[in-house]
Amino acid sequence: MKVRIENLHHPPGSQIRDMLPDDVTAAAEIHLRSFPGFFLSFLGPSFLKEFYRNMVDSPFGVAIVVCCQNEVAGLACGSYKISAFYRDFIKTRWLNLSLAALPSVVKKPSTAVRLMRAIITRPGFDKDISIPGELSSIAVDPEWEGRGLGRALLTAFLQRMKSSGCTEMTLDTDRDNNERVNAFYLRNGFTLAGTDRTPEGRWMNRYIIKL
């Protein structure tokens, strides 16, 4: 398998490349360390592995990692065709996702409803489908923060989306107690498009960027 490496300026000693199947476990671990207490983290490492494995396998997915000292230090992933990606996601991964989420559903049955709403209805879930691309997840391992890896990952991800033919991209992030992340997106060219409240009472900022 030929691995595409981004030809971009990034912090010394780091390398940005395609996420590979062998990177899925590291991606799940970074997600758990970066987003403790969040919904996908509650679903557990098995679910996260399926989530990131689909990002690698999907023809509509874009998934990259940044490596430092020969280890995965961060990741960014999403899709350049939201609706097609989630239709393929449900078709090819639904059984595996359900089995992976089962322990969490048994522990908290309401998780099943939230999971169905988040995935099955995702292509039309409070989204402007005219915006084709989406950044689903970006994270840097807490041990590697402060080295400019997040910005390098985002720059590489945006370039990859543009080269895939995507002209506009969206992302959602928490509005409250999340000032550093919101400032990061504004500083890197995103525009705040609106704020919505989820059924769980969580206020989310939606950002867009033209590529």
Image (cartoon, helix red, strand yellow):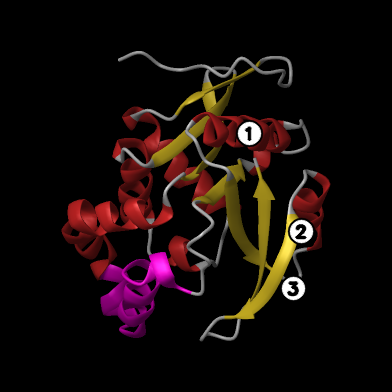
Q: Which residue is mark 3?
A: 176
The answer to whether residue 174 is left or right of residue 3 is right
- The stretch drawn in magenta includes residue 104: yes
Residue shown at 56%/50% (left/top)?
33
The answer to whether residue 158 is left or right of residue 100 is right
SS label for mark 2? helix
Residue shown at 34%/29% (left/top)?
22
- Magenta region: which residues? 103-125
Q: Residues within 10 Å of mark 2 (few under 14, many from 20)?
A: many
Quarter where residue 15 is shown: top right
Q: Which residue is mark 2?
A: 182
Residue found at the very far left of the displayed protein: 95
Residues tagged 3 and 2 counted as in contact (Cβ below 8 A): no
Q: Position of residue 198 (x, y in %)?
A: 55, 81
**From the image, which quarter does the N terminus lie in?**
top left
32 w.r.t. 40: above or below: above
Q: CA distance from mark 3 to mark 1?
A: 24 Å
Which kind of residue does numbered mark 2 sit on?
A: Asn
Which kind of residue does numbered mark 1 sit on?
A: Leu
Residue shown at 34%/47% (left/top)?
49
If you read the primary sequence from the N terminus, does the residue marked by circle 3 or circle 2 appear first?
3
Q: Position of residue 6 (x, y in %)?
A: 57, 19
The answer to whether residue 37 is left or right of residue 21 is right
